[in-house]
Image (cartoon, rainbow, N blue to C red):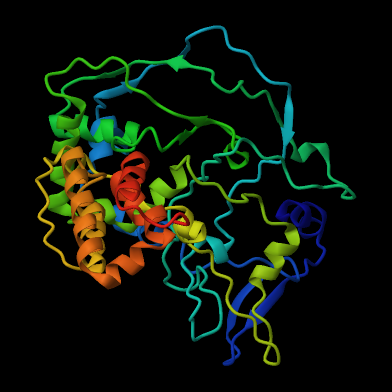
Amino acid sequence: PWKFWRDNYLLKGKKVPVFYSKDKQNVLQHFGLAYMYKLPFNNSIHGMYPIADYQNSKLDLATCMFGYTERNEGLKGRLMFGHAKAKEVFECENEVQEILGGPKASYYPFYLNQFKDNRAEKYYTYQDKASLKGFKRYPVHSSGVKKTLNNSGLSISNKVYSSFKPLKEGTTFIEKIRFHNLKPLEIGGLLSAITFHGNQDKCCHSLGAAKPYGYGKVQVEIVDFNLEKSIDEYMMLFEEALEDKIPNWWQSPAIKELLAMASNSVDINLEYPSIKDFVDYKQTGNKWNKKPIDALDYYSTILDDKFSLKGFKSVKQLNKPQPQLELNFTRYQDLSSELNRVLKEEFLEFSEENKILIADAITNVYHSHKASQKKLNKAYDWENNINNWLGKELTEQLKESLNLPINV
């Protein structure tokens, strides 16, 4: 530290060692007090996209609702979350000790967008005008908490451990949210944030310090709502405003990543990389042995086929009246393509009336088209597509009515 050199050397007339670096023109670039002194990057986090765009932007919806203070300006908030009080006497588990390492912005392989087809064959760092990977968030664990990596054989100080007493699973709290003069659109935005836009049965919020290990997983339910409109009506207003600004916002990458991170239905092996892993990630090899850039994939990509937006629908989609399907197809392949398109783009599931029409259409193509009959004599479509369209019970009834081979 500079205080050491100042008090023990400089103020006593002794020389202070200084290390420096010059460019190819022999011009001084920078200097420091250590042989491997640290350099500031050309760009800071606040100079990166998308945060840089926020500086000159107008007030966003959240800021208008919660208020802000900045220098000589301010806006009073109109929204307040009360204290969450336990519904009954709650119990704590035994004390737990974990190493709670937080994300470090300086670790650019994970923090910045990297491209695996990077022709420069080097990482983008804060020296480059790169963009941030996203917002920091820990994925929800669907299969309980996970313990830290096995640190046997390592000499680790107790100072790096954090101690806490987690609440027992199933503990319930109740809190009130108070607001004043919120517009219907703003109420819709608030309800959307609380319920993951009506998908609270599939998604969880994360609270507390030990989120990386699966603690703090919370499902929120609105139990007392007495306003002029229904919850869906308020969220519909919010949807319409979003649609004006961001067409097809429900299918946007940001929403996909949020729902993937919060989804309580999928789980993978989530754990911290080891120190060796972090070192390996930064290595890009040498001129004799090139190593590809280790970029951090988006979470939905890591989950691969374990997560899909198919089960998540906007309020508009959920409340959209379902018209009677017109299914005049002569081939099963054409019928299948149309039904999968409608499920993906329009409905969460088919109505009971449309399920009967689908069953009739499958029966017609089975009896009138030999190639379709051959395809439907195999188990694959019955276990996947048809079961998805009709449900298990109606699928079994249809199979029985067609007198299909026993292996189907």
What is the x, y in percent for residue 342?
A: 20, 55
Above/below status of 334 relative to 185 = below
Above/below status of 260 relative to 161 = below
Q: In the figure, is residue 76 to the left or right of 399?
A: left
Q: Residue at x 60, y 79 (%)?
A: 292
What is the x, y in percent for residue 95?
A: 73, 24
Please identify the quadrant where the C terminus is shown: bottom left
Q: In the figure, is residue 76 to the left or right of 92?
A: left
What is the x, y in percent for residue 385?
A: 34, 56
Q: In this orientation, does residue 248 appear?
A: no
Q: In the figure, is residue 155 to the left or right of 322?
A: right
What is the x, y in percent for residue 54?
A: 30, 53
Q: In this orientation, does residue 137 appear?
A: yes
- Closer to the camera in the image, 44 or 188: 188
Q: Residue at x 16, y 40 (%)?
A: 353
Residue sitting farthest toward the top:
89
Above/below status of 18 relative to 13 = below
Q: Residue at x 43, y 56 (%)?
A: 134
Please identify the quadrant where the N terminus is shown: bottom right
Q: Residue at x 26, y 58 (%)?
A: 340
Write down the quadrant of residue 28 in the picture: bottom right
Q: Report the number of numbered marks.
A: 0
